[in-house]
Image: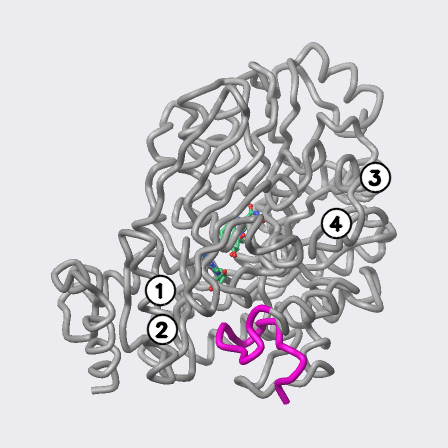
Amino acid sequence: DGHDDFLQCMSLQSNNHTSISNIVYTPNNTSYSSILNFSIQNLRFTSETTPKPLVIVTPVHESQIQPVIYCAKENGMQIRVRSGGHDYEGLSYASEVPFVILDLFNLREISVDAENKTAWVQAGSTIGELYYRIAEKSQTLGFPAGVCPTVGTGGHFSGGGYGALLRKYGLAADNIIDARIVDVNGRILDRISMGEDLFWAIRGGGGASFGVILAWKIQLVDVPEKVTVFTIDKTLDQNATNIVHRWQYIAHKFDKDLFIRILIRRGNSSEDSKRTIQATFQSLFLGGVNRLLPLMQQSFPELGLQREDCTEMSWIESILYFAGFPIESRDVLLNRTQPNVPYFKAKSDYVQKPISKNGLEGIWKLFFEEEAEEAEMILSPYGGRMDEISESAIPFPHRAGNLYKIQHLVYWEEEEVEATQNYINWIRKLYSYMALYVSRFPRAAYINYRDLDIGVNNNGNTSYAQASIWGIKYFKNNFNRLVQVKTKVDPANFFRNEQSIPPLNSW
Ligand code: FDA
């Protein structure tokens, strides 16, 4: 079997055989499939045709990672590191070449230092676990990361990471102050020993190209004791087109304490026979309702926000609210699995000029097509803190000049290849329709919404020119510096995948 030599190597490398056998799974193990599948978030990559790992290793201690890197290299296997398993294209758990999954879910210690407003977070923790542990220590500290609690900090922070605190505090990656990583030679490095170039690269450049991130030290941020949330739906006959149109001109200019995103779906009109679009305005305000109402009256009267639409709560309750859970159910933040895993395909865009009403109406039309029954568009406002951080501060380059980001999503339930292709064709059609209205040269994209349609590497033989096709979209000019860092820290391109940063010598 392909994994025998690897296993033998692992036991030679380890001084404690029993502990290794407890953390290594091959297809012969009864729990191999459940370990493989438990954190997969996209059913597209659970089929029989999805290539499976020869081995899964689930270290319980940092020292167990070095042998995995050594033995994978020795045996010509690739490593896919998985933290939360949310990669949109399954890159953390599927590869066309013989590979091992290094799954970090057992490395999820979180220590919160409320006095100094910092925390060390092991990369296998989810953001839900992080939010929970922060709230255990303080009601007035938070962290600006994503909305879905099961997202892993390993992948999420290394690709940027954002949620409802984005306009006030920027990205998760903007708030990382130290990190620990295992490099290609098995050395464990921190910020000082890895140096500022590598530390820069892993905060937004995607961790997978550079090593195995073990832990992050993060700067916690202040949140008020009381925040206010609201959700308001508008259908076409409730003026949705005009209100969405208006939002584009103002949402990035609102007070930094105010975040209003829009979710767009096909809706049910009051008359059953009539198709409509539903735009859902969902908001987090960092303050009480008495400050919010006059602010909304002044900045966005078109939405018609009323006091009864608003609920005051603690920041941690707002996390549950945004994630769609009852605000009393705080313990769900510790769950690492989601109840309903979908089939989906997603893409991202950045908008720099408001889309005309005609342009919006063209989108609505596409949402009336058959494949769009479960499609969604999420519009997240930028501005605020995002405008203040320079494009090169970290690899994530999408800053001033962007009004908002769009995530395009299509979900489905059928397993069949043909159905899959129809949905994917639909989202590609939407994406080409959008080309007129979004950023150009490059048409920017967000690496955490990974999309292999925008370009891929040849396994191990990728030229700089080829990789820049997708690299410039994710990173703009920062792509060049990422290539330099890669060339320095992993010149033989051991840590690679379909969209990893190539070193300069690999063609
Ligand atoms: P996963 O484990 O799949 O890893 C993703 C990538 O990072 C892979 O290439 C992997 O190899 C690499 N990697 C993971 N751990 C690593 C480590 N320790 N060292 C080195 N490389 C590592 N994003 C966002 O910004 N805001 C949001 O609100 C959401 N919401 C959201 C909801 C849902 C349901 C999904 C499926 C996804 C999101 N995302 C998101 C996107 C999310 O940020 C993105 O998928 C992250 O990369 C996921 O990180 P995981 O660790 O979970 O993924």
Q: Where is residue 338? Give x, y as percent.
A: 36, 48
- Residue at the extreme top of the image, as rendered: 290
Residue 393 — which label? 4
Could you tell me which secondary element the residue under label 2 belongs to? Answer: helix
For discs 4 and 1, the disc positioned in front in the rendered view: 1
What whole-number distance in Å separates the C-alpha atoms at marks 2 and 1?
A: 6 Å
Of callouts 2 and 3, the N-terminal one: 2
Give the residue at mark 1: 66
- Residue in the foreground of this view, choosing between 200 and 171: 200
Q: How is the image coloured?
A: one colour
Residue annotated with mark 2: 70
Q: Specify the amino acid type for callout 4.
A: Ala
- What amino acid is labelled 3 in the image? Arg
Q: Residue at x 80, y 68 (%)?
A: 442
Camera-side mark, 3 or 4: 4
Amino acid type at mark 1: Gln
Residue that mark 3 sits on: 246
**Closer to us: 346 or 476:** 476
Find numbered disc 4 in the image and state the secondary structure of the residue it sits on. Answer: loop
Marks 1 and 3 sit apart, C-alpha to C-alpha, by 54 Å
- Whether the residues at callouts 4 and 1 have beta carbons within 8 Å, the answer is no
Q: Is residue 252 above or below residue 32?
A: above
The mark lying in front, picked from 2 and 3, is 2
